[in-house]
Image (tube, rainbow, N blue to C red):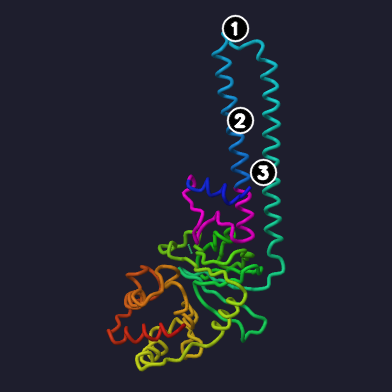
Amino acid sequence: MNCRRITCAAAPLLLDGCAGSQNALGGDGADAANFVRLFIIFIVVCTAMYALVIAGLFGALWRRRREPLTVETGRHDEDAPLFSRALAVWAALIVIGLAGLTLASFLADRSNAAAAKNPKLSINITGNQWWWDIEYVSNDPSKSFRTANEVHLPVGVPVEVTLQSNDVIHSFWIPNLAGKQDLIPGRVTDIQLLPHKAGLYRGQCAEFCGVQHAHMALDVTVENKADFDRWVAAQQRPAFAPATPLELAGYRYVTTRECSVCHNITGTPASARVAPDLTHFASRRSIAAGTMPMSTGNLYGWVADPQSQKQGNNMPTVGLAPDELHAIVAYLERLK
Ligand code: CUA
């Protein structure tokens, strides 16, 4: 029987969908697939128990209506042995049901622990109000690189994700792939991912962390190994140099003025670490941790007035002149 199909039938009741890039019933990773199986087992067992209770209730009502009560006890005398038997069967069913659910939970937990043993890839993720700082770690430090708000994962490869927070408690959650793991200031936590299926997914901070908690999303691309290796090679390169006079003007502004106080662009004088790394900014799918899709129009809006786009974030509204804004946007779009 197809488990996904059963889940789909139940999904509308749970205000969830079967398809979708942010779907806890997607089962597109090892942990998530275990959770989906566990979810179906719980639904089936609990529904069966509920149906038995309702059937017993209607059975009792039917018997009571059919025959008159005895005056002394208020109950059918011949019901006593039947009542005892039913009670014993019901107690046994409860014990078996609960033991079965406990065993299923235990096995799912063991399976999750075993799925991503011997990780082949390490990623450090740091939560910030309200964005994700992401570092792909290599044994060769010159091959390590940083990005923000977007992770790429090779399909079928176990990944170790180490999690920290710079400010408050956040929670790392890619529903299609695995469960949640908190990021706690002053502590290091971790989660293992083993994606089964290529696709574009959406992660979301799952712990309220301030006014823009809802705008703390994570774009996730699961792709085949060759595409992943190409992406890694592109990310490891320094930023593209400006190619037009307008881009050059933008480069000069971004690497010497306000932007360079917070952002890093590898291969340029901008080397700060307190805001998202911009080295390959324009290769990403969204702006400001999933707040808006990457597009020229959205980029103009964001650079011109980040406070009106995502109120309370740490990027100030600078008050740029129109020619400065054009130049900055042109340069940022060069950072593929
Ligand atoms: Cu970070 Cu909610």
Mark number, residue 332: none
Relative image position of residue 215 (x, y in whole percent)? 43, 65
Distance, label 3 to label 1, CA atoms, is 42 Å
Mark 2, residue position: 52
Where 244 sits versus 152, above or below? Answer: below
Relative image position of residue 129 (x, y in whole percent)? 46, 68
Sooner in the amino-acid sequence: mark 2 or mark 3: 2
Relative image position of residue 161 (x, y in whole percent)? 61, 69
Which one is in front, 163 or 177?
177
Q: Mark 1 and ligand 1: say if the CB distance to the nearest ligand atom is below 8 Å.
A: no
Left/right placement of residue 205 relative to residue 86 reads left
- The magenta segment is 13-39
* Residue under the image location 45 percent in, 73 percent down: 285
Which one is in front, 24 or 122?
24
Mark 1, residue position: 70
Q: As drawn, which residue projects farthest toward the bottom?
A: 245
Element at label 2 = helix
**Res 303 visible:** yes
Q: As drawn, which residue projects farthest toward the top?
A: 71
Element at label 3 = helix
Q: CB under 8 Å between callouts 2 and 1?
A: no
Q: Is residue 170 magenta?
A: no
Which one is in front, 220 or 313?
220
Left/right placement of residue 199 relative to residue 108 reads left
Where 92 sits versus 202, above or below? Answer: above
Element at label 1 = loop
Q: Identify the amino acid type marked 3.
A: Leu
